Image (cartoon, helix red, strand yellow):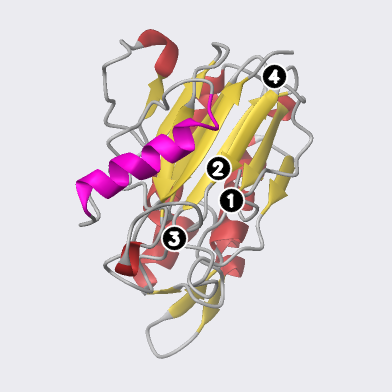
Amino acid sequence: MPRSWIVPDWPAPAHVRAFVTTREGGVSRGAYASLNLGTQSGDDPQDVERNRLVVREHLPSMPRWLTQVHGTAVADLDAMEDSEVARADAAVTGEPDRVAAVLTADCMPLFFSDSRGSRVAVAHAGWRGLAAGVVENTLRAMQADPRDIVAWMGPAIGPAAFEVGPEVREAFVAADADASDAFRPHTPGKFMADLYALARRRLARAGVHSVHGGGFCTVSEADRFFSYRREKASGRMGAFIWIGAP
């Protein structure tokens, strides 16, 4: 596994396996160099396929790719046909070696596991998904007491780079007045938003208190991460989680 790929430092059971890719390790060129996993990004499809095969070498099975729409739907991979591609922004599984995956390039990948490692999930959590309830929906799909869940926040746009309009702030403050703490006034009519703080608040309000990770910035760490905010012609990183052998 390339050294720059990220393995979560979190207290999930040892047989729960997860990692997030970075730009390193692939064959794509130009703005997509080098490990772009996104098929809708404008990259050469053959290069993307080769990149996906690179990642497959580090997985127990083919990942279950989703059609992501910045929404709140959660795919139950155990109830789907192997060939089915769900229109969803999160996936959950309780079957060993079944790989749940999301793609990101500024939005946050969120990993979940219960304390026994009997059920795991991953969510694609940008501001739209967070505000609309992707965290809460994923936790319901976990079918576990939220106090028994551990979560990890992966690479996302950092608070020094995430300028948003008032509609983003209002989307969160309408449901949680204290979410205003995650927004810092910037230029007239604009705020700097802390996506990590917003995710922590959503998780805490849902009952999850074992939350780890964070501290990345996909925009400023250009050599390490893809960023749609930084470059519209941007690749996508992948976040993968599965239940391995005990």
| Residue type, mark 3 in image | Asp
Give me the C-alpha separation between circle 1 and circle 3: 10 Å
Counting other residues with Cα less than 10 Å from the Cα at mark 2, is it few (<14), some (14-19), or many (20 or more)? many
For residue 110, which numbered disc appears in the image?
2
| Residue type, mark 1 in image | Gly
Q: Is mark 4 on a helix, strand or loop?
A: loop
Image quadrant containing the N terminus: top right
Give me the C-alpha separation between circle 2 and circle 1: 6 Å
- Mark closest to the chain's N terminus, 1 or 3: 3
Task: Report x, y in % for residue 161.
Answer: 49, 76
Region in magenta: 44-59
User: What residue is disc 3 on?
Assistant: 106
- Mark closest to the chain's N terminus, 4 or 2: 2
- Mark closest to the chain's N terminus, 2 or 1: 2
Q: Is mark 1 on a helix, strand or loop?
A: loop
Q: Verify CB contact (< 8 Å) between mark 4 and mark 2.
A: no
Q: What element carries label 2?
A: strand
